[in-house]
Image: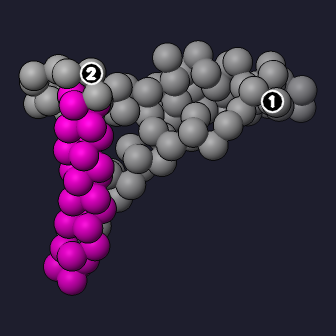
Amino acid sequence: YGRARVKVVRKHPSFFRPKHAAPAALVLALAFAAILPLVSIAAWPLSLLIVGSYAAFLVAGSLWLACRKRFPYPQYLAVSLICLHLGYGLGTLLGVVDLARKVMTRRRMAW
């Protein structure tokens, strides 16, 4: 879905909203949080802050949705939200990479 969103926004730039970039930013932040401690042991607190913040929002969002819709299994909502966020974010990033490749190929052919 994120991959197609990049194509739509390219054709219709006015359709873009910051919320469309949020999942891609999340994926980048989580990747950064995973790599950062490998570079410096002093970076562990920042990594834990990034992952912990997402986990806290995930738990709060799942509980809120479960209460609002009277759904008895908030843990399933949490898993669904993780899949949704990561899938959309990775798709958006892949869509941007596809677009960059396409633009670079056109520029090379124009030379």
**Which quadrant is home to the C terminus?**
top right
> Residue 29 sits in which quadrant?
bottom left
- Judged by its main secondary structure, the magenta piece is helix
SS of the residue at dot 1? helix
Q: Amino acid at mark 1?
A: Pro
Say what amino acid the circle numbered 2 marks.
Lys
Which one is in front, 36 or 60? 60
Residue bounds of the magenta highlight: 40-67
**In this rendering, does residue 35 appear at all?**
no
Q: Is 59 rendered above or below residue 62?
A: below
Residue in the image at 34% along x and 33% along y: 86
Residue tagged by mark 2? 69
Q: Residue 48, image x and y in percent?
A: 20, 66
Q: Is residue 19 left or right of residue 49?
A: right
Residue 53, given in percent of the width and then of the height, sits at 28, 59
Above or below 9: residue 93:
below
Label 2 vs label 1, nearer the camera: 2
Q: Give residue 110's position: percent from left, percent from top.
A: 89, 26
- Residue at image point 57% right, 39% down: 19
Q: Is residue 31 above or below residue 42?
A: above
Relative placement, left or right, of 21 versus 62 is right
Residue most extreme to the right: 110
Q: Is residue 65 magenta?
A: yes
Q: Which residue is mark 1?
A: 13
